[in-house]
Image: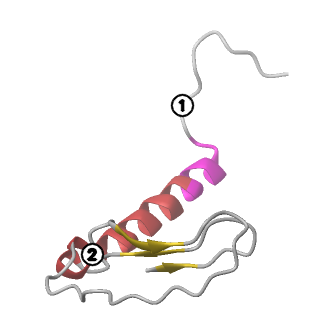
Amino acid sequence: MVYASTTGESAIIAPDGGLIAHSGIWRQAILDARVPLVSYRTLADRVGSWPEYLIIFLTVLALAWAATGRHPRRRGTRTI
């Protein structure tokens, strides 16, 4: 990953999170480095997109439940 900053520190980061090259703060620099490719499948690749669809479905379900207003009221609350 390449992180370029106009005001802070720029860096080249390896797939495992290690720092390959970086510039100083407020330094103009040209960073050049070889970054190894990832040769394994990530968790997101293995699982697929079904967790995203599940979260969207649960969010829509919660919004529909809240919009209906048919949820039970708590004891001791008054309506004005």
Query: Is residue 54 toward the left or the right of residue 59 in the image?
Result: left
Residue 69 to residue 31: above or below? above
For image coordinates 52% across by 64% down, the residue present is 60
For image coordinates 33% across by 75% down, the residue present is 14
Q: Quadrant of the C terminus?
A: top right
Question: Based on the displayed image, in which of its 4 quarters is residue 29 positioned?
Answer: bottom right
Query: Is residue 59 toward the left or the right of residue 50 in the image?
Result: right
| Three-letter amino acid code at the position of disc 1 | Pro
In this view, the residue in front, 13 or 31, is: 31
Residue position for label 1? 72
What separation in Å lies between label 1 and label 2 (alpha carbons)?
A: 38 Å
Q: Measured from the top left, where is residue 74 in percent x and y? A: 57, 20
In this view, the residue in front, 25 or 75, is: 25
Q: Which residue is outermost to the top? A: 76
Residue 62 to residue 13: above or below? above
For image coordinates 26% across by 69% down, the residue present is 16
Q: Measured from the top left, where is residue 43 in percent x and y? A: 21, 71
| Three-letter amino acid code at the position of disc 2 | Ala
The mark closer to the camera, 1 or 2, is 2
Magenta residue span: 63-70
Looking at the rendered structure, the secondary structure element under dot 2 is helix
In this view, the residue in front, 13 or 26, is: 26
Query: Is residue 36 toward the left or the right of residue 69 in the image?
Result: left
Q: Quadrant of the N terminus?
A: bottom left
- Residue count near mark 2 (Cα–Cα under 10 Å), binned few <14, some 14–19, many ≥20: few
Residue position for label 2? 44
Q: Measured from the top left, where is residue 46 in percent x and y? A: 17, 79
Query: Is residue 15 toward the left or the right of residue 68 in the image?
Result: left
